[in-house]
Image (cartoon, rainbow, N blue to C red):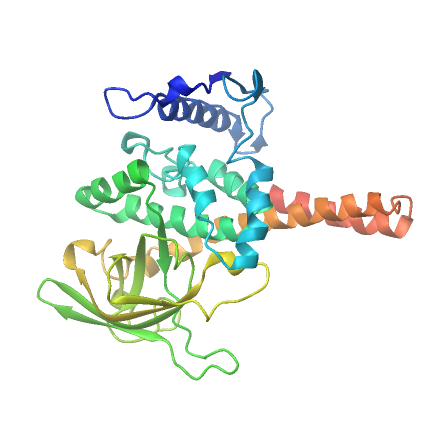
Amino acid sequence: MVMDQSTSMNHRLNSGQSKAAFLADVLNKTLYTIITNCSKADGVRDYFHVGVVAYGGKDAAGNGFQGGLGDEALRARADEYDRTATFPKSSFDALFGAGLLGATIPVDAGGLGFGHHRGNTFPLWMMTKLIAKADLSLARCWEGHTNSLVLIDAMGTPQQKQRWFSGVVERGEIWVGWSGEPSAPKPGERARFGTMATPTADGWIINGSKAFATSASGATHAILLVNTEGPGGARHSQGAPDGLLMLACDLSDRSISIDTSWWDPVGMRATASHLVRFDNTFVSRDCLIGKPGSYLLDQWQTAFVPHYAASFLGAAEAAYEYAVKYVKHQNKGSDPYIQHRIGSIGVHLASGLCQY
């Protein structure tokens, strides 16, 4: 595939979309078709060899897979994001620019149509694995975004899908899902976590806090898992399953505040999984996703487990490659003990991939 990257590609089509964006969309959907044709029940078939050559940029011609979404570019940004405890916004912008932010949005709504409820999840899992291999924090935020869109696709109304999918595809809006209301505080923590959802005539008033709120400083919308019977969210409530609601919340609401001092784990700071507080935050009734209790009754949390595992498989592959590189640098490759350990790790990784 040969791709034009000259300045003329910035010109707008009648639809308002740039030529570059249109070309990227066509290229990405072509790659998606190739990937799905190679994805079989018993594994991945080696049907195609794909190359993308870009021309018209700074160089006469070059690798079209380089740039803001390249593996090295994502990895290079990861270090800075972790050191500064910053949400990986530029990496999300690169995903948006490549037409990938709508991976779990239906094709007819401008996305790629991935998702287990559509029988097409393997490409999503492998995409997440590759992202995690470059930046695990980014992959964890990406998980929350794509999983949230799966929930909207599966249970949202036509009006909800039209409103929220267009925001992702056209404006690069970022989603996440928040449940975290642990009943036991971390060591040294005095505050208790939890939310109260008080019904009103046209919606709900949310008060309280959620911990481990991934993408808190970067997401534009969150699906709040709140329980009408009191604090606990999805995991800790003792109430009936149908008391659990999924409410889509616009995070630009001024009644929402973020405590960025709460989350500071080395290596995962960039997930921005902060403490979020809600002070009389109103969520209208038309932002209720699905029927009450559907998240638990339809076992959605279980459905997302393989996606969760894909992130850590990608991170493990990166650690393995780093270890092999280090062993070679130290000229220890001939040590039989090290060979055994490296080989064992490789077998475990290959076994993990076989689960998919």
The answer to which quarter of the image holds residue 268 is bottom right
Residue at the location (39% across, 33% down)?
99
Q: If the image is split into quadrants, where does the C terminus sit?
A: top right
Q: Is residue 306 visible?
A: no
For this view, does 233 lie left or right of residue 126?
left
For this view, does 117 lie left or right of residue 42?
left
**Above or below 344: residue 191:** below
Camera-side residue of 288 and 258: 258
Q: Position of residue 75 (x, y in %)?
A: 59, 44
Q: Position of residue 96 (x, y in %)?
A: 40, 37
Q: Is residue 80 visible?
A: yes
Residue at the location (15% across, 69% down)?
199
Residue at the location (32% across, 67% down)?
257
Q: Position of residue 82 (x, y in %)?
A: 55, 56
For this view, does 63 lie left or right of residue 331?
left
**Above or below 245: residue 28:** above
